[in-house]
Amino acid sequence: MSPLRVLLASMIGSVIEWYDFYLYGSATSLVLSSQYFPSHDHAVSLILAFSTFGIGYAARPLGSILFGHLGDRVGRKAALIYTLVGMGISSTLIGLLPTYAQIGLWAPILLVALRLIQGVSLGGEWGGAILLATEYAPRGIRGLYGAIPQLGVPVGLVTGTLCFTLISHLTTNAQFLSWGWRVPFLLSLLLVALAIWLRTGIEDTPAFQAQRAQGDIARVPIAEVFRTNWKNVLHAIGLKIGDGFLNVFVMSYVLTYATVYLKYPRNTALNALTIGSAVMLVIIPFTGYLSDYIGRKRIYLSGLVLLFVLSIPYFSLIPRGAGWFYAMEAVVLGVVWGAIFATQGTFFSELFPTKVRYTGLSVGYQVAAAIDGFGPILWTWMAKTYGPSVGKFSLFMMVVLGFSLLLTLFVRETRAVAYTGAEPSLSPYR
């Protein structure tokens, strides 16, 4: 099996996920709030629109259980094909959805339904992509392989940014609001077709094949994981919540925060996000490889400490000019959060045995993501009530980061953990 094809197949789903994540986050403040949730109060429209953003996240735990069950019983490959189908259908239909002015109340209802489908699909995507990479990893470089799917984040964001920016330049404001914003959603279908082609051409992972050959398959993976590994599920949830809130802010809500409350031009906010994403393209593979030598926990812990310390400078400096805005996105998003994210998939997956790894990894991550997804609603209320308060926003981030930081102290280092108990020769760490 070609390692390049395996890694591309693992990464392409994350590209689609974060391409759609960026599109939806951007469209929420630009289009969806006014065309699907009209209100005389712009803040109310934003809150209602961002609630659909949160609903998509809330559906992810259901997807993690559903596709985790499929991935642990039938195979990683089968689950990852179905997640792509759900992602492709929902994104395409969002791009075709009539507005409130055209079909009334059905518009927001259908938008919520599509976000639920999208959320369920995405709930099973990340964990499967991580396992596709790490369970194929050669000896000694599991951290590097586990970092490759995470590259889908900056690639997806940059692709979404370029697509949205290009459409904005090629259309008038009226054309963009009428049909231009739909084009990037429809183009995601091309990415899905490419992803399906890549994934249908690979075999299931060696770890799962060995597990299946033994006949040791969990009958009900979600029940088994909570019976035997419930502490590790809680660890994954706790470790993800802090950086997850910061991630949603600096990669999505920052566009609303910067343009609506700090009065930056939209291009400035897009440039800042693009710079941070570009830095991640270098940091993620480097840090993943580094974690194979110094360990996951050390990097993860150091990253959370730095994010905690940088919370006040971040919110203090981004209003002071485009240069500071660019620099803080590069450091906070590109370097520090990029380093945490590079190790996250491998770190979390090493907490679980092969038998329930898809379910345990996915449920832990996606429950935390469901909580993090409602951050934009809270921040919109905070900004409406207090304005872009440095104290309020930085304190919020420090509290949630401090929570994850404290929990990380109690999680073991996993770099030397045997990844497959049934077939020790496949373990990269012996």
Image: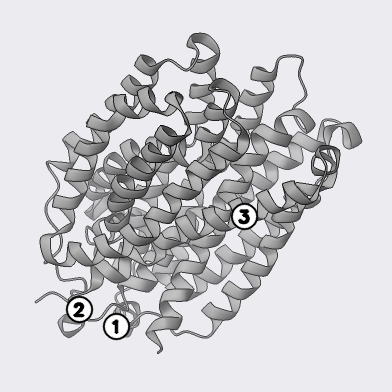
Residue depicted at 53% across the width and 29% down the height: 258
Give the left or right position of residue 407, taking residue 82 as reference. left
Sooner in the amino-acid sequence: mark 1 or mark 2 = 1
Instruction: Assign the C terminus to one quadrant of the image.
Output: bottom left
Residue 10 vs 116, above or below: the answer is below
- Nearest to the eye among marks 2 and 3: give it: 3
Q: Residues within 10 Å of mark 2 (few under 14, many from 20)?
A: some
**Could you tell me if the residues under marks 3 and 1 are in contact, i.e. CB atoms within 8 Å?**
no
State the separation of the CA atoms marked 2 and 3. Answer: 46 Å
Tell me the crowding category of disc 1: few under 14, some 14 to 19, or many 20 or more residues within 10 angstroms, Cα based.
Answer: some
**Residue identified by numbered label 1:** 210
> What type is the residue that disc 3 sits on?
Leu
Residue 25 percent location from the top left of the image: 59, 40
N-term mark: 2 or 3: 3
Q: Position of residue 360 (x, y in %)?
A: 33, 56
The N terminus lies in quadrant:
bottom left
Q: Nearer the viewer, residue 342 or 96?
A: 342
Residue 242 position by quadrant: top left
Give, as a three-letter code, the residue at label 2: Ala
- Whole-Å distance between the Cαs marked 3 and 1? 43 Å
Disc 1 and disc 2: Cα gap in Å?
7 Å
